[in-house]
């Protein structure tokens, strides 16, 4: 499976997001499409530049944000060694990609579906909205710290009803949590909530979904090495406390089925 999913492709375009006034560590990376037209939104890929040496033997996991006939797009926030090197790629550079990996979000047509994104957790929802059979049944609430221009928010807001909430200071947090819970309440009867973002954000969503018996799926971000179930680098626990690998069983789990 590893070899079948592994391809070498070229960078088509790379650009830093943000404005001249507010430069950023957020990058939109567009690669040649390795043949992923049938990917499922919520799936991810491991990326590794071909010229990386032995000091960086593993690729890094990123949500597949969107796929079209020619290209596949990722949104990457620079946080460490791998992401800073990916951000220095240039058009024509070669990247080894493993994917699409993992399971992806449910997409039941006609079901009122709330997309909850925290920070770079917005990335998979771009493709999710574009590929959904009834996008009019979708709604996005996006919680973020840095400016909206750093994320693919505006392109999504053109496609679905969308709301952005910014955390300027830690004092904003209780208000943001209250707003998330208020919107989730609207999906308690026959709806679906999908969430992607940092662990504290997912924890908020999971806790409320369990309390109110709201159907929800959450996409976990775990440090990964192999990305294909071979190294035990990404272990989490299911609801019964049994260990499972996020890359092989996830990254999307029912809120009832995983411990954060
Ligand atoms: C399924 C999945 C999808 C993801 N999608 C995106 C995405 O679309 N855009 C994006 O910017 N990031 C995404 N991430 C997070 C991204 O993989 C990490 O930020 C990246 O691997 C860090 O690599 P690094 O070498 O720069 O950082 P390192 O030098 O390895 O570490 C720097 C910091 O990042 C933390 N870190 C390392 N790996 C991860 C990880 N996998 N998840 C969370 N924190 C990590 C480390 O604990 C450390 O604090 C995703 C992660 C997963 C598991
Ligand atoms: S990253 Fe190796 S088992 Fe998941």
Image: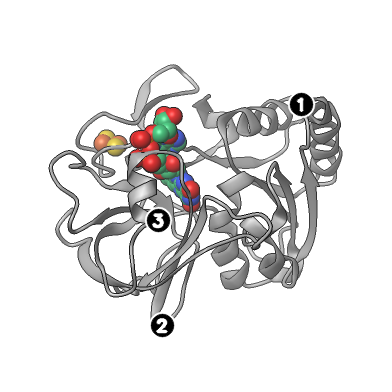
**Residue 170 disc label:** 1
Relative height, residue 75 to residue 157 (above, below): above
Who's the residue at 49% across and 58% down the image? 27
**Residue 44 disc label:** none
Label 3 sits on residue: 87
Question: Mark 3: which secondary structure?
Answer: loop
In which quadrant of the rendered image does the N terminus lie? bottom left
Q: Quadrant of residue 57?
A: top left
Q: Nearer the viewer, mark 1 or mark 3?
A: 3
Label 2 sits on residue: 69
Left or right, residue 25 beside residue 84 = right
Who's the residue at 22% across and 43% down the image? 58
Q: Quadrant of residue 230?
A: top left
**Badge 2 or badge 3: first in the primary sequence:** 2
Question: Mark 2: which secondary structure?
Answer: loop
Q: Position of residue 16 (x, y in %)?
A: 52, 62
Relative height, residue 57 to residue 28 (above, below): above
Q: Position of residue 33 (x, y in %)?
A: 34, 74
Relative height, residue 28 to residue 131 (above, below): above
Q: Nearer the viewer, mark 1 or mark 2?
A: 1
Q: Position of residue 45 (x, y in %)?
A: 35, 55
């Amino acid at each position: 499976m590893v070899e079948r999913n592994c391809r070498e492709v070229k960078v088509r375009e790379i650009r830093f997001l943000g404005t001249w006034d507010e430069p950023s560590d957020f990058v939109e990376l567009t690669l040649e499409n390795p043949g992923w037209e049938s990917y499922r939104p919520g799936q991810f890929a491991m990326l590794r530049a071909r010229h990386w040496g032995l000091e960086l033997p593993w690729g890094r996991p990123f949500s597949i944000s969107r796929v079209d006939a020619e290209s596949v797009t990722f949104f990457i926030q620079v946080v460490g060694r791998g992401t800073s090197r990916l951000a220095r790629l240039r058009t024509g550079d070669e990247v080894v990609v493993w994917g699409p990996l993992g399971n992806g979000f449910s997409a039941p047509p006609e079901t009122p579906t709330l997309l909850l994104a925290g920070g770079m957790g917005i990335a998979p929802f771009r493709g999710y909205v574009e590929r959904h059979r009834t996008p009019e049944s979708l709604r996005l609430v996006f919680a973020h710290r840095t400016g909206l221009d750093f994320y693919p928010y505006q392109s999504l807001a053109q496609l679905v009803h969308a709301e952005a909430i910014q955390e300027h200071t830690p004092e904003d947090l209780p208000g943001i949590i209250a707003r998330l819970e208020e919107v989730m309440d609207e999906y308690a009867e026959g709806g679906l909530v999908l969430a992607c973002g940092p662990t504290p954000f997912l924890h908020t969503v999971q806790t409320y979904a369990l309390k109110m018996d709201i159907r929800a799926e959450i996409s976990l971000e775990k440090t990964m090495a192999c990305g294909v179930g071979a190294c035990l680098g990404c272990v989490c626990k299911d609801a019964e406390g049994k260990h499972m690998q996020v890359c092989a069983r996830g990254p999307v789990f029912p809120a009832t089925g995983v411990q954060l």
